[in-house]
Image: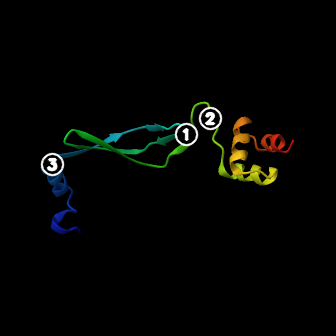
Amino acid sequence: MMPGGMGNPRQMKRMMKQMGMKSEEIHAKKVTIETEDKTLVFEDAEVVCISVKGQKTYQIVGTPREEAAEGKVMIPESDIQLVASSAGVSEEEAKAALEEVDGEPAEAIIRLTS
């Protein structure tokens, strides 16, 4: 148990209220975060919104599935290493070749060795 009764949910809510904090669970079916090079998709994630003095912070708990950003192909690190070692090129060159052939390792190796 935490000191001062902090393990008690009622005490915790009272302290949060005194500090001007509110938390609210959001029942989300799906959460999507888009970056320049990938999209993270959380299915059935646990989402909590914490409000402090007008500022909101969202906490997402779950395991994301990675997807390629629109117009890009997700290339596994293992494919990059395979192409680099098979074609005798750097990993940067292997990745560029894989991107040109939509992530097909055999095609990338043929292009780099021809």
Instruction: Tell which tag, 3 or 2, sits nearer the viewer.
Output: 2
Under mark 2, the amino acid is Lys
For the residues bearing labels 2 and 1, Cβ distance under 8 angstroms: yes
Question: Crowding near pointer 1: few (<14 within 10 Å), some, many (20+)?
Answer: some
3D distance between C-alphas at marks 2 and 1: 8 Å
Under mark 3, the amino acid is Lys
Quick check: 79 left or right of 72? right
Residue 10: image location, x then y, percent: 17, 55
Residue labelled with disc 1: 38
Quick check: 62 left or right of 59? right
Residue 17: mark in rendering: 3
Q: Secondary structure at mark 3?
A: helix
Q: Earlier in the sequence, mark 3 or mark 2?
A: 3
Quick check: 27 left or right of 15? right
Q: Earlier in the sequence, mark 1 or mark 3?
A: 3
Please give the name of the residue rendered at 55% of the width and 39% of the height, measured from the top-left corner.
38
3D distance between C-alphas at marks 1 and 3: 38 Å
Question: Crowding near pointer 2: few (<14 within 10 Å), some, many (20+)?
Answer: some
Rendered view: 86 above or below 3: above
Instruction: Tell which tag, 1 or 3, sits nearer the viewer.
Output: 1
Give the quadrant of residue 1: bottom left
Q: Secondary structure at mark 2?
A: loop
Residue 41: image location, x then y, percent: 50, 40
3D distance between C-alphas at marks 3 and 2: 46 Å
Residue at the extreme right: 114
Residue labelled with disc 2: 72
